[in-house]
Image (cartoon, rainbow, N blue to C red):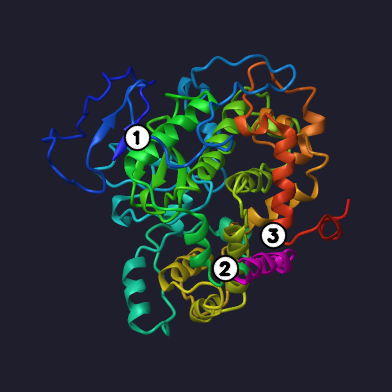
Amino acid sequence: MVLDSPAYPPPLHPGVFHADPQPRRLGRKKEGPLCVREQLGPFQSSPPSPESDSSGPGRRTKQPKLLRGLGEPPAMRPCLALQGPCSWMHRSESSCLVSQKNWARGRIRSAASLPHLSRARAEEGPCRAGKRSPCLLVALRPANLEAEREQFFRSSFAYNPQFEYGEPVPEAVLEKYREASGQFLVQATGIIKAVLQKYGTYESFEASNGGKLLTKCQIWSITRKYMQKEGCSGEVVVQLTEDLLSQAVMMVENSRPTLAINLSGARQNWLEGMLRHEIGTHYIRGVNNASQPWHSSEGRKQYSLKPANPTEEGLASLHSVLFRKQPFLWRAALLYYTVYQAGHLSFCELFRDLGRYVQDAGVRWEYCVRAKRGQADTSLPGCFSKDQVYLEGILQILRHRQTIDFQLLAALGKVSYEDVDHLKKYGVLEKARIPHFMQDLERYMQQLNHIVATNCLSDEELEQLMPE
């Protein structure tokens, strides 16, 4: 099911069903991964959201205060990205084929905030990328993944998968991410153990805190209301699918910013955190970045900018848990730990090792594949260390949270927290957007402090890890 925000191209009448690509009867149940392409007008009613806004259930969202000097944004502003290619959305791990032929007519350039492995078939070919190297996530996804998964499970987890790749894996990328870091291993395992100490298993934590799975209508209602709070209604296409292994992914489809949400992972109490991650962080920082003089690679060199990561993903990951009662950084911590262990263990050994923390064999398989992607013979130690960026970015931001100007960090676009001070005099700030949850900085800082305490961290520990 694809729910399109009706800003561009011109909206259909609310409630009109738009078939894709073949005409179909309204009663037809399913064709491929998506059933119906539905366009909802801005005034069409939908079921109330079971997830209360961070301001409390039943309260109206207040008009957010603005960063001084940024000016008053209109309720709806044309997206800069719609005036040309959405190049600002492409991050380092940028390209992946996540659609099937009945999904969409064109291929999708991914900008996943959490790298994922698509279920798309390898024989559909690489992403359209001109003369550039093959799409990274397509190249890193084993072509024989499903067959190796079946053999691994049939062997009672004693077989080390032998992965084959349909596209040549970029050697420069593998070299860049060949070595895992152990700098934050103590913090990663501490976070994992804090969750298990409190809840026994991660599955119990998820059931206690995530809430029930949401229906398609509930997901759309919550997402639409969130877009209204950020003033970006009609700018981002929303797709609901069951074909992602991650919770969600921001991407560009037909030059339009597109958010794909995994139906199987959309939980009542966690969906808005995902929207803060994808829309409130990646999308808004991307739109702001498009107005800055450093929006191009040449501009970044001119201003001597540091890479946007790990700040970009660290900030987005913090925003995912920002208003949770129990804001444990479980996923970032387990990804960090898994990658580190993969650098020293075979696939089978890694799978058994993760059994200490994750009971579900299917979930353990996914973590192992992510950490071992790019390898052919997984009986050998080796890792793809990209997933360590999340915890690294989180801890860097928490370490320096008292001195970071978070509103400027959002307004200046896709920049590192380390570059904010020297960029602020050059930034174009008049029309910059600030996420609604950053308007009350006092409350925002309280939430960051709560995250530090919940995850058994301390300022003294962070200062020792990352001295000035």
Q: Position of residue 351 (x, y in %)?
A: 50, 77
Answer above or below: position of 155 versus 134.
below
- Provide the residue span drawn in magenta: 179-197
Identity of the amino acid at label 1? Answer: Pro
Q: In the orientation shown, which residue stands out farthest toward the front?
A: 58
**Residue annotated with mark 1:** 47
For the residues carrying marks 3 and 1, which lies nearer the camera in this image? Answer: 1
In the displayed structure, does residue 410 sit left or right of residue 152? right
Answer above or below: position of 345 versus 115.
below
Quarter of the image for residue 198 reads: bottom right
Instruction: State the CA–CA distance, disc 3 to disc 1.
Output: 35 Å
Q: If you read the primary sequence from the N terminus, does the residue marked by circle 1 or circle 2 appear first? A: 1
Identity of the amino acid at label 3? Answer: Asn
- Is disc 2 placed on a helix, strand or loop? helix
Instruction: State the CA–CA distance, disc 2 to disc 3.
Output: 14 Å
Taking depth in this image into account, of 206 and 81 the one nearest to the observer is 206
Q: Is residue 252 visible?
A: no
**Residue annotated with mark 3:** 455
For the residues carrying marks 2 and 3, which lies nearer the camera in this image? Answer: 2
Taking depth in this image into account, of 292 and 406 the one nearest to the observer is 406
Residue drawn at the location 44% of the way across and 72% of the way down? 360
Quarter of the image for residue 103 reads: top left
In the displayed structure, does residue 291 sit left or right of residue 450? left
Query: In the image, which disc is placed on residue 465?
Result: none
Query: In the image, which disc is placed on residue 199?
Result: 2
Identity of the amino acid at label 2? Answer: Tyr
Q: If you read the primary sequence from the N terminus, does the residue marked by circle 3 or circle 1 appear first? A: 1
- Is disc 3 placed on a helix, strand or loop? loop
Asked if the stretch drawn in magenta spans residue 91, the answer is no
Q: Position of residue 173 (x, y in %)?
A: 57, 56
